[in-house]
Image: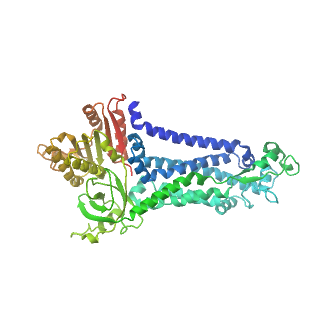
Amino acid sequence: MGNWVENEGLSIFVIFVWLALNVFLFTWYYFVYDLGEKFYYTRELLGPFLALARAPAACLNFNCMLILLPVCRNLLSFLRGSSACCSVRVRRQLDRNLTFHKLVAWMIALHTTIHTIAHLFNVENLVNARNDNKTTIQTVLSRLEDTKNETYLNFARKKLPNPEGGLYVAFTTLAGLSGVIITLCLILIITSSTKTIRRSYFEVFWFTHHLFVIFFAGLVIHGAGQIVRGQIKTSSKEHNPIVCAKQFTQWGKTPECPIPQFSGNPPMTWKWVVGPMILYLCERLVRFWRSQQKVVITKVVIHPFKTIELQMKKKGFRMEVGQYIFVKCPAVSMLEWHPFTLTSAPEEDYFSIHIRIVGDWTEGLFNVCGCDKQEFQDAWKLPKMAVDGPFGTASEDVFSYETVMLVGAGIGVTPFASVLKSVWYKYCNDAINLRLKKIYFYWLCRDTHAFEWFADLLQSLENQMQDRDNAAFLSYNIYLTGWDESQATHFTVHHDEEKDVITGLKQKTLYGRPNWENEFKMIANQHPSSRIGVFLCGPEALATTLNKISISNSEADPRGVHFIFNKENF
């Protein structure tokens, strides 16, 4: 139990508090509208669907307040960098910002569904009551304001039968029209956020996500129509609904039951969301200001496996290991920003990113940088770039541990390039105060060409460690996962040679996938009573596996070995 609490305890606590607040708000507002005397006559018109519409509306306000906070990257980076505000455990929660963002989004979708369905029944009941010619309490309430000195309760004022009456309400009232618009925006945002769309049609995801501007604008004005109405206080004192409801045919004829007066609920949503909206606006202004600063591409390097490296300079740019930036190339697209992990080290006088060519935008960047040409490209012909960032990630905490496991899959090795480069520079400068004493590095890749651009860095680090008589500092394992047994057998013939025939490194390339259980047990035996940081940049399936093994191989005793799992998210 202790090892599970170490890795997941705070995350589960945060989720539990968030869910508990949703349950509390839903329950509280459900009973406010289901039992409150103010809404006695409103319930007579709408039935149980009044409370079922208003309770999720309160939860929507709460979750819409939260949805923008996890994507305020500058705020999160500031909190990550402030050791006074954030311990390592809290920083690990900040690294899960996108996970929480998605959870809140699904909660918004759930409450929107309940809210919308309930209001569909409400509108049907209101239109039917408005068109009913029988003398019932519903028809009497619906006729209010047909004569002077009355205030209406039924906002369906025109006598149109369903479905025409319902459509008229939906598209002619402020609440109805804004509700339709923000629901459509939400559907487009959520459906375009699926993994398939994000990976194959990133532009669709990027553009539809910016419908959030329309969504929040509609959300703020949605309640301004004040269609949910209740009896005003002064009227309640003169007209007791519990007593007078049975005498609805005598309203206004007896002093005990004057005609009830109603007013709309004042809009509340803006009070919930105005703070996060202002915060996010400031976030975007900071991003815009930084994106206008001049960026110079100093070098473009074409690596194997359809990967290019951009080395750039920007005045005042400062970074930490493993951070990422957003990049825009106006020559390719004026609006699209894409995140890339920095592969340079803070000690270098430039910053760099490695980009694998996998889509329209990266293909366009490849071409405008002249990578499709055989001759060298003049520097002045290189495209202008805009850079926003850097932003913090889990890899910043690598130097907070004495022992770490770095696991990269494919191009996911990029944040660890920054880490290993920084280690190399620190050892070149005799880093005697370096807390990090041991690195276990794992790189999983399907194709041999992917190793080539990274092998030089590993070779330099390998030589540096040997020259300083500290070869044990870095243990690395490179796994070729895409080969079958016959291909691997061909290369195992050369296993006894001094250097690997694929990478040129002394450490031999392994074939297949690691036995993670054995790797964790071996490392646990080597480093008893240690907190070992496990850092992954790779697919979700691998993250799930490593997280489970980190928990299962951590000891319940606080003084024992503990594997602390961290994953890159951006």
Q: Left or right: where does residue 447 sit relative to residue 81?
A: left
Q: Residue at x 41, y 34 (%)?
A: 5
Please name whichever residue, 100 or 120, is drawn nearer the observer in this view of the structure.
Answer: 100
**Location of residue 162 with respect to 232 vertically, above or below:** below
Quarter holding the N terminus?
top left
Residue 22 at x, y percent in the picture = 56, 43
Outermost right residue: 254
Whether residue 18 is visible, yes or no, is yes
Q: Left or right: where does residue 108 sit relative to residue 472?
A: right
Q: Residue at x 13, y 47 (%)?
A: 499
Q: Left or right: where does residue 167 sit relative to residue 483?
A: right
Please name whichever residue, 193 or 308, is drawn nearer the observer in this view of the structure.
Answer: 308
Q: Left or right: where does residue 554 sit relative to residue 68?
A: left
Which quarter of the figure has residue 11? top left
Identify the image's colour scheme: rainbow, by chain, secondary structure or one colour: rainbow
Residue 473 at x, y percent in the picture = 21, 41
Which quarter of the figure has residue 546? top left
Whether residue 481 is visible, yes or no, is no
Q: Residue at x 25, y 63 (%)?
A: 300
Outermost top residue: 557
